[in-house]
Image (tube, coloured by chain):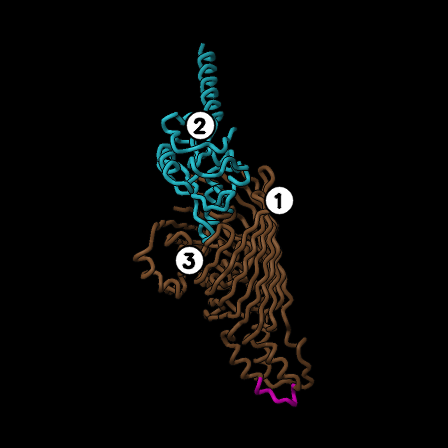
Amino acid sequence: MKKLIFLFILLSICSFANSAFAKSIAVIVHVENPTETLTKKQLIDLYMGRYVAFSDKQDAQPLDTFTPENLRTLFYKRLVNMPLSRVNAYWSRVRFTGRATPPEIQQSEQAVLESVANNPSAIGYVFSESLTQQNKQGIKIIMELYE
Amino acid sequence: MCALLLLPSFMSFSAERISLSGFGNFGIVYSNSDIYRFRTDISRDNDNFEDSLDLNAISSLGIQADISLHDDFDFVTQFIYRGQKKITLDNTLSLGFLRYKPAPNWELRAGRTQLDLYLLTEYRDIGFAYPWAKVPTEVYGLLPYRSLDGADFTYFLSNSGLDYRFKIFAGESSSTIALDDENVELAIDNVLGISFELSQFDWTFSLKHTQARTQNNISTMADIVAGLQLIPDVIWPDKATFIDDFSLVNKKAHFSSVGLKYDFGNITLLSEFARLRSRSSVVSAVKSGYVSATYNFDKGQFFYTFAKAKSDPSKFNDAVNIQRFLPNQVEEIILAVNESFRVFSPNQQTHSLGVRYDFKDNIAIKLQVDQSNIDAQGGALWSYQGMNTLAPKESFTTLFFSVSFTF
């Protein structure tokens, strides 16, 4: 019996973990931003301070977010296959040599949505499932990142 | 420096956003050598020969302000404390530049920037940025200069999936050189450098070349030159040529490096080869390099590095043809000249093994073991009490433990 309970708990944990990792991440910009899509390389360039502009050479302002937990970790894992500590190590090379500043960190997905809706230069990311008809006003999805 | 002085008036009416950040490294170094003491580079003195544990050698603390002034302008300033015995604005200010960036693919910076001599020179004091406890001493130990007062221009081009980054810079710099019993200034001017990087995100190939002019003789070199001039021409007819070669005044120095970093899967390979040469016979041609392999796991890295520095210092006897027996005073001068030839002449190699563990996303602990083999008279990169010409061959182990962080 104990073994069955343990197996059940283990399967539940795995199922929960899988569902967290399977969530897609939507990359969003202002609805009037002329960018319709990005390649993964362009997104890497934007988020890693290499070339911080859209295809039409307009400056971009990338945004990160603290919450929900794991969103930022998953985003960078899918983008550059690095844990956050290595992303931070990379940024310490870029930032402290005066090459570029890292993305501005917002407190929540809602703050990211509001910033993007109010700023044509902003680009951010949220879990796709967090988007509703209401909070999608003023933004558009230009890319989705999957596991 | 001018940019820094002009900043307050510019900021008062136009600063849009200021962000503060910083980094630090608290480290302990233990060595089982009684002869050589570790230092990160020749600008650092280490007279702690009483204790095997050293708390200063790899410790540093830095703070940076990024100030957005306008759509096209920003200002960056950074101060680093890394064990300077006398703290001044000049020796703690590592960045202080105004940037003009009217387009995403080019920028112009004026003020104080970090001197981009080799692949890692710009961030060698930022421990969190690399896996090792310190950058390979064989390549970076002979570079005392950190900052450049001047300007640089960078152009970025992305084409067919490849990124090209060109940078040219010009200016001047100054640093102390820590000798056995004193710290002396050695200034360089007419610095002119070019840096080229070809990359994708998972690999970078870099080529860098800089030329500069040393401005002054160091320590007793002026006295040695005065002494050499007293030797009668009858004894030494080629004296004038030798003295001209010996002096560091107005002598060109060249710094060149080629580097490659490649990430594949969990492995990162990094290799760099550098060459330093000067028209002065005091600075011998130095070839150095390292190969480093890193295995990346979720919370850290294991690494192995092999580094080597090789130089061929000038010798007084090779340079002159003195036929007669020498008076005692002349022999003393010859001794001093040969001593000078060893100041910039390392001959050593090191195997390093270590681990970095990322305790948090912005805090890493590192442990590194170095096994160094120093040739006789080849320990220029280390603190050594005594005459360089009598410095013995030595093999020893150095342990590094550090906590690196950013905030």
The answer to whether mark 3 and mark 1 are in CB contact below 8 A is no
For residue B233: magenta?
A: yes
Towards the viewer: A117 or B328: A117
Tell me the element at label 3: loop
**Vertical placement of residue B76 versus A64, above or below:** below
Q: Whole-Å distance between the Cαs marked 3 and 2?
A: 46 Å
Q: Count residues near mark 3 (Cα–Cα under 10 Å), then give few for <14, some for 14-19, many for 20+.
A: many
Main SS, magenta region, reads: loop
Give left or right: position of B330 versus A106.
Answer: right
Pointers 3 and 2 within a single chain: no
**Vertical placement of residue B389 versus A100, above or below:** below
Residue B23 on image: x %, y %: 41, 50
Query: In the rendering, what colour is chain B?
Result: brown
Query: In the rendering, what colour is chain A?
Result: cyan
Q: Whole-Å distance between the Cαs marked 2 and 1?
A: 31 Å
Question: In the image, which residues are magenta?
Answer: B229-236
